[in-house]
């Protein structure tokens, strides 16, 4: 047999064996995803970690400075204010989104008229582009053209327009309201999907035992929904903690840095200010909090697997 034919036969046999192997096919299909993650996730993250330990500026490669950036940021009043704003913004917005989302999910899970229509309408805030909704809220909260102030003045409840974005605390609660408006649909629809997986037989059995609606919610709905709540709240907190577009379009961190979050401050220092190392350090300082949220999600999923009787670890 000629060498060429032998080589072709061996190649064909190896290719056939490869295609018949489930593990090999799995690796082949995973390669594009792995390459994508390395190029657009791992490399930028690694570069950000490196820049956080340098004094890099835009247009100039930095040198290693160790923890100098983090030591400076620890004593920087603006950074500490941004950390407070981020925690306050994330906590209040996430709690309100959860309460409103749970209430809407329980309402839409009941047999009410036009239920399908309301389920579709509730998704509208979530599908509107963030920048567009941020511009709408900027107009709603504008000191001169606010429709809220106009309506309150017409009703005689106030005598002058409210400066929603000119006062630090007014601005904080205004951007929280905008974030809640955008985030409630995600929480509500996800919790609604979880509610629909609960078997009606649990409620029938509890009703036979004389349980009230509140007891059914506390002893049946809430325990079975807890794993879903853990995942939903984890994602909600992640989205809120890393929020950028909404804040940047509405307030750009003002007034007096009162609405600066860690994400917007990192952008301001790195891009507008040119201090790439400092901005990267601020961004990397967010990572431990995000990892904590991921761990919370993991334990929530583990509990769900345990409730379903799975032995997988």
Image: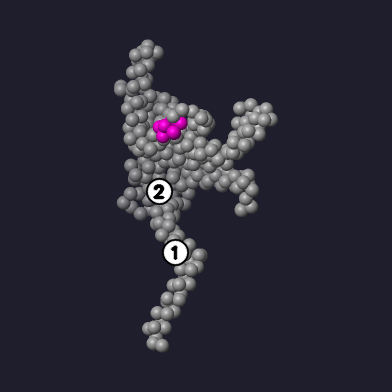
Secondary structure state at the residue bearing disc 1:
helix
The percent position of residue 123, horizontal first and vertical second, equals 41, 35
Point out the residue furthest to the right here: 209
The answer to whether residue 30 is above or below residue 10 is above
The percent position of residue 214, horizontal first and vertical second, equals 61, 27
Q: Residue at x 48, y 49 (%)?
A: 67
Q: Is residue 168 magenta?
A: no
Magenta range is: 115-122
Residue 152 placement: quadrant: top left
Q: Depth check: 16 or 154 in front?
A: 16
Cα separation between marks 2 and 1: 38 Å
Label 2 vs label 1, nearer the camera = 1
Q: Residue at x 40, y 42 (%)?
A: 266
Does residue 238 appear left or right of residue 139 in this picture? right
The percent position of residue 220, horizontal first and vertical second, equals 62, 35
Point out the residue furthest to the bottom here: 1
Does residue 201 appear left or right of residue 69 in this picture? right
Q: Which residue is mark 2?
A: 277
Q: Depth check: 91 or 217 in front?
A: 217
Secondary structure state at the residue bearing disc 2:
helix
Q: Which residue is mark 1?
A: 28
Question: Can residue 50 be seen in this snapshot?
Answer: no
N-term-proximal mark, 2 vs 1? 1
Magenta stretch: helix, strand or loop mostly: helix
Image quadrant in which the N terminus is located: bottom left
Question: Can residue 224 be seen in this snapshot?
Answer: yes
Local packing at callout 2 (Cα closer than 10 Å; few below 14, some 14-19, many 20+) is many
Local packing at callout 1 (Cα closer than 10 Å; few below 14, some 14-19, many 20+) is few
């Amino acid at each position: 047999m000629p060498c060429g034919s032998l080589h072709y036969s061996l190649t064909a046999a190896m290719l056939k064996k490869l295609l018949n192997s489930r593990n090999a096919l799995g690796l082949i299909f995973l390669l594009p995803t792995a390459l994508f993650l390395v190029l657009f996730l791992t490399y930028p993250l690694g570069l950000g970690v490196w820049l956080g330990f340098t004094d890099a500026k835009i247009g100039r490669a930095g040198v290693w400075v160790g923890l100098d950036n983090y030591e400076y940021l620890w004593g920087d009043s603006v950074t500490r204010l941004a950390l407070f704003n981020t925690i306050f913004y994330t906590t209040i917005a996430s709690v309100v989104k959860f309460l409103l989302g749970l209430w809407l999910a329980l309402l839409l899970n009941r047999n009410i008229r036009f239920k399908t229509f309301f389920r579709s309408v509730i998704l509208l805030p979530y599908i509107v582009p963030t920048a567009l909704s941020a511009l709408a809220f900027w107009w709603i909260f504008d000191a001169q053209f606010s429709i809220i102030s106009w309506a309150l003045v017409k009703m005689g409840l106030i005598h002058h327009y409210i400066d929603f974005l000119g006062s630090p605390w007014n601005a904080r609660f205004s951007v929280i309201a905008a974030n809640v408006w955008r985030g409630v649909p995600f929480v509500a629809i996800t919790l609604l999907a979880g509610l629909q997986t609960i078997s009606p037989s649990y409620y029938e059995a509890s009703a036979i035992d004389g349980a009230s609606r509140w007891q059914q919610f506390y002893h049946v709905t809430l325990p079975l929904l807890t794993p879903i709540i853990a995942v939903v709240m984890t994602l909600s907190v992640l989205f809120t903690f890393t929020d950028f577009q909404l804040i940047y379009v509405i307030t750009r961190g003002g007034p007096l840095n009162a609405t600066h979050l860690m994400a917007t401050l990192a952008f301001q220092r790195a891009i507008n200010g040119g201090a790439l190392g400092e901005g990267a350090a601020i961004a990397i300082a967010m990572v431990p909090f995000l990892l904590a949220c991921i761990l919370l999600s993991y334990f929530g999923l583990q509990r769900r697997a345990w409730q379903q009787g799975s032995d997988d670890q």
